[in-house]
Amino acid sequence: MSVDHYENFPVASVLLPKALRPAVHAIYRFARSADDIADEGDASAEERLTALHNYEKALQQLQNGQPLSAELAELNPIFMPLAAQIQQHQLSYQPFHDLLSAFCQDVQQSRYTELQELLDYSSRSANPVGRLMLGLYRADNAENLHWSDAICTGLQLTNFWQDVAIDWQKDRAYLPQALMQQYGLPEDFPSQCLHNPDAYLHPAWQQLMQFLVNHARHLLVSGAPLIKQLPGRMALELKLVILGGLRILERLEQVGFDMFHQRPVLAKADWGRLLWRSLQPLPSPTL
């Protein structure tokens, strides 16, 4: 199981109230299709950006209460159900604009210098999903949004660290270059790890990854008070998502941060572990 923010979208969850399923499916279809434009296939960067800008135009037309123009009519199957659900549940349009901003950034940027840049990216790539879910539950007050943002950013960062090797092979690197330099590691260290099975044992790599894993864990746990603010089924869903992210971080530690030869994922046996842990209190946030 990836802790990517769309893979965790509860589109098929038995815990999701039936009344909210059409909205979740409409939101998911929008986000998944736009993300695929940014990441999948053989289109050029220019073609990807054009397609994403068309999404932005369509979204703006909906926000203005207009039908999609003729040039965007092919997007009706995605945007018409979305418009209906936004209106029915009185959702904000801003999270959708934020998602599109992040997808455009995916096309244009493949390296990050500072950790803060990743936090900014996560605020637009991951946090909007949690904000929309809270909107559906009419639980999107300021405090809840703060906790949700921490959880979603923690999940996004966990996915980055889980997929260092996969992303590197796609010519993407989310490891902050300034932190790599601070720990005395070259930018191409992931390449060294892919070609040398023992390179990951470098003490500096171990220290860097432990810092990054601790940071992501802190974010996940610091958002946990949100669980107590939500109705039972959503609270359980959220707790399992947090526990899934924490388990991936635990797996990263167990493989010694060698995600180059054994990508940490949740196995079938982990689901029983997560259900058991869902009955226990979550750990307190520490850094």
Image (spheres, rainbow, N blue to C red):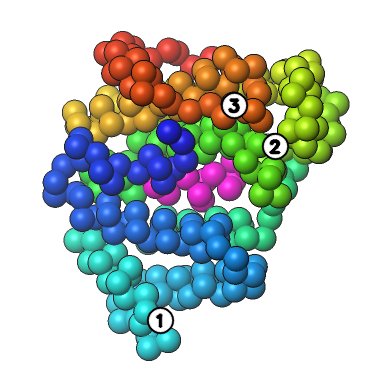
Depth check: give the residue in front, 238 or 92.
Answer: 238
**Where does residue 61 sit, x and y in percent of width and height?**
38, 77
Depth check: give the residue in front, 113 or 252.
Answer: 252
Depth check: give the residue in front, 187 or 228.
Answer: 187
> What's the mark number on residue 72?
1
Mark 1 and mark 3 residues within 8 Å of each other at the beta carbon: no
Q: Which residue is mark 3?
A: 262
**Where does residue 4 sit, x and y in percent of width and height?**
47, 40
**Where does residue 154 sit, x and y in percent of width and height?**
50, 32
Mark 1 and mark 2 residues within 8 Å of each other at the beta carbon: no
Identify the amino acid type marked 1.
Leu
Give the residue drawn at x 14%, y 46%.
Answer: 18
Prevailing secondary structure class for the magenta stretch in the rendered image = helix
Number of the front mark, 3 or 2: 3
Q: Is residue 116 left or right of residue 64?
A: right
Give the residue drawn at x 52%, y 72%.
Answer: 51
